[in-house]
Amino acid sequence: MFEKTITELSAALRAGEFSSVELTQAYLDRIKQFDGDLNSYITVDAEGALATAAEADKRIQAGETGPLIGIPIAQKDIFCTDGVKTSCGSRMLDNFIAPYDATVITRMKQAGMVMLGKTNMDEFAMGSSNETSWYGPVKNPWDLERVPGGSSGGSAASVAARLAVASTGTDTGGSIRQPAALCGITGLKPTYGRISRFGMIAFASSLDQAGTMTRSAEDSALLLQAMAGFDPADSTSADEPVPDYSATLNDDLTGLKIGLPKEYFGEGLDPEMEKTINAAVDEYKKMGAEVVEISLPNTHLAVPTYYVVAPAECSSNLSRFDGVRFGHRCEDPKDLEDLYKRSRGEGFGDEVKRRILMGAYVLSAGYYDAYYLQAQKIRHLISDDFTRAFKEVDVIMGPTTPDAPFKLGEKASDPVSMYLSDIYTIAVNLAGLPGVSIPVEPVNGLPAGLQIIGNYFAEAKLLNVAHRYQQQTDWHRAIPEGYDV
Amino acid sequence: MQWEIVIGLEVHAQLATKSKIFSGAATTFGAEPNSQACSVDLGLPGVLPVLNREVVTMAVQFGRAIEAELGYRSVFARKNYFYPDLPKGYQISQFELPIVGRGDVDIELDDGTIKRVGVTRAHLEEDAGKSLHEEFQDCTGVDLNRAGTPLLEIVSEPDMRSAKEAVAYARKIHQIVQYLGICDGNMQEGSFRCDANVSVRPMGQEALGTRAEVKNLNSFRFLEKAINYEVERQIDVIDGGGKVKQETRLYDAGKNETRSMRSKEEANDYRYFPDPDLLPVEFDEAFVAEVTKDLPEMPDAKRVRLIEQYGLKVTEAVTLISCRTLADYYEAAAESAGDAKLAANWVLGDLLGALNKSCLKIETSPVTPVMLGGMIQRIVDNTISGKIAKQVFEAMWAGEGDADAIIEAKGLKQITDSGAIEKIVDEVIAANPNQAEQFRAGKEKMLGFFVGQVMKQSKGKANPQQVNELLRSKLAPS
């Protein structure tokens, strides 16, 4: 049952091949068997999962037909879950149990999904390797010495190792697409605002976007269908119609115009990675797509711009973790200042502190214009690059990451080289566009991802383009050695 | 040295919405601590603000009332600082693009002249919670009921030149927000708060002196006293060869002094930036027209109308319009009475006196405008005299019914039967021959003595005019 897609599982559940309780128990057993090494879950909620699965079985017996009823899923530990610990990968929230569900969680519950547990992640989603988690690093199932990417590393690893049918992620600068690429799965970051942020612990509010981490584009379409749509509790969620994402998966790609930004194939890109990306693009040519070179001239400004905007917002978003009302509080505070200093000093890890410091700095009187305002202007230039490109092409393709998964500890002490691993994904967040990473031919036996970027609210097109490739190839079906089903 | 005083005010008016500015929690004053704070007010992880549309309507109404420029696109910004009663570690406010821009209000000075005071801007923001230091030993309690309550912060230009002008301006703003019904104006409960920026400069100098911001002014009286104290203090500092420091000072009403709270160096760098959780607030002319189409008459217009329509004196009109409910009360009473002047006398005299004495608001007056008007009718039609009317008013106040019922029950009807009055007059003259002789000899003021005696005999019920006429004719030299 571990190799089945959501559509296949759904059919099997309905046909009575096995129940949701059996399916859920099988996944829980598998988590027990493999996750000791992998560390992809922070919390496993066996009791809650089995109870929900039993509910789902009743709904199925009652004839309900939703495609997600009874399907086990893992939720990134950034989404608040009523009654189940939500740590955001931080010591700060190690004791935090939210009194409410995030909108994403509510919608999945309504769709009948079974939550197996909460997945490991970089602390407050700040990281590209899952090494900043208070709960220890997640390992890449393709090579336990390597990182799974981040920040949604636990979500990516759990899906790759078949410890969940699918999972959710969040993507602020590449946190879905980069780990999806490094773990060989399909990761979709929708348009900013497509999915409600309510109940999703904020890192950088103007960039954060929830999305799907699945084995295929087909599964992603089903999940996105449940997650997408306007939410009155999130003023920045988009009041745009939600199309039927599954309906257009098989659309013909003849005449599809693909743009390859020359800036994504330049210096810094591993030649082996370039080769596999080109091979994937050739596959599209065979399907009748046209390929043109385009330019996104401000690409080189994306990383520095992001590292002004995101820390600025995070420095403010993380102010609420002050030891006063919830979360970590130091022992015996002497006075208010001591309470703040020690609670935050003990509760946050180094990377989070680094970003709070950067953010407070760029917003300070005297620096605001030079950094924050300037970054906002460049952000517009970056968006304009894409707007211009989408007048010419339907989708943009390139590598998701410059190279294959790096080793644990390799970049941990060099933040800048770590930040550069998101060089191809960050601009997409700054522009608010949707992007998907799909597995292509591995590089030296390690996963590699093709990033497909679409125009605003063009998720259906992205999933269509991704799905057609997955019908021609089998890279997305590959299972890491040792995790055979 | 002649000093010129320069004052600007920041007024925080709590908007009278049922729910908070960014959450659905109630705003009722005085509830159990933390019983009106939902997950958004608590700043729990993951929650998001959603703007209460009503506050936009109220801010636009205020903007229109002071004929201000409106911010058709305004932006919420975060003001970042740490404090236990500020749950998110930032206050959502407006910074660069406020919802209300430059406007004006006119204030009346003591000499009757009108002075125009500029309003720089008014912006929407959320209130913080309350830290309770006294009730707990060795720790501080935090009540977040007030967190997220909507405020309109109204910032004036430094246009005021005395504490009295500052008070007149504050009262005017108070009047406007109450007239609009967007703020209950209750200063004790903190629904209407003032901070004063005070500085002094040598008369004739153009550059402004260094200002101090004085906080904690929860009545108009304290506003005036605090400014006067602060002005004296600053002049003393300069006269003593010192320099006024830019700082925030707290007014202590008990000691009638201001003391330093924090200096400019200690002030927070608020690191304002646009709040990415909220979209810019945008509206158009049609929206403005819609929300301002039923605006009530504003105080200035009402003052002019009351003077014209009812023939009131300026001072009478000014007092009557000080509060919209008082003006409404007056107009209802005047209509019912049929005598606007007399109605003004009664409302401004006995009614306000009685309200003050029993600490009641006009809304809860036991004497309704119709009751007061009915009583005045009985004065006008000579059923009772003005003096007897005071008794009737007291009885109405005590809940003994309307004027007619009281006059009937207590037998207060005026004696207008000239035969009955004549009988008393004859008796009084006969009983006081000496006084009658003196009057006839030209001692005119003896008439008052006789009137008094007659009124006494009639228990105040004789028609005073008839008494006068009869006495004059009977006492006339034969």
Image (cartoon, rainbow, N blue to C red):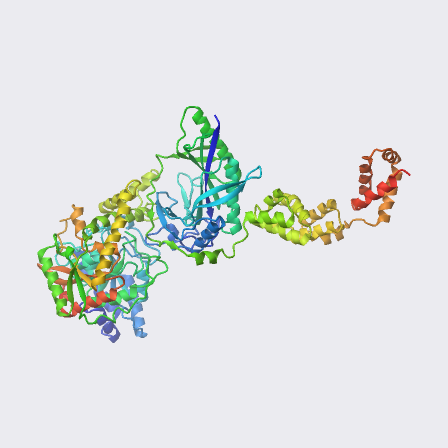
Q: In the shown orientation, is residue B83 left or right of residue B337?
A: left
Measured along the vertical axis of the image, is residue B451 above or below residue A459? above
Q: Nearer the viewer, residue A256 or B329?
A: A256
Q: What is the quadrant of the C terminus of chain B in the image?
A: top right
Measured along the vertical axis of the image, is residue A299 above or below residue A477? above
* Residue B31 visible somewhere in the drawing: no
Instruction: Give the x, y percent position of residue A365.
Output: 31, 40
Q: Nearer the viewer, residue B255 or B107?
A: B107
Image quadrant of residue B237?
Answer: top left
Instruction: Give the x, y percent position of residue A228.
Output: 30, 63
Residue depicted at 83% across the width and 33% down the height: B443
Instruction: Give the x, y percent position of residue A250.
Output: 21, 72
Residue depicted at 79% across the width and 46% down the height: B463
Measured along the vertical axis of the image, is residue A138 above or below residue B352? below
* Residue A176 visible somewhere in the drawing: yes
Instruction: Give the x, y percent position of residue A470.
Output: 16, 68
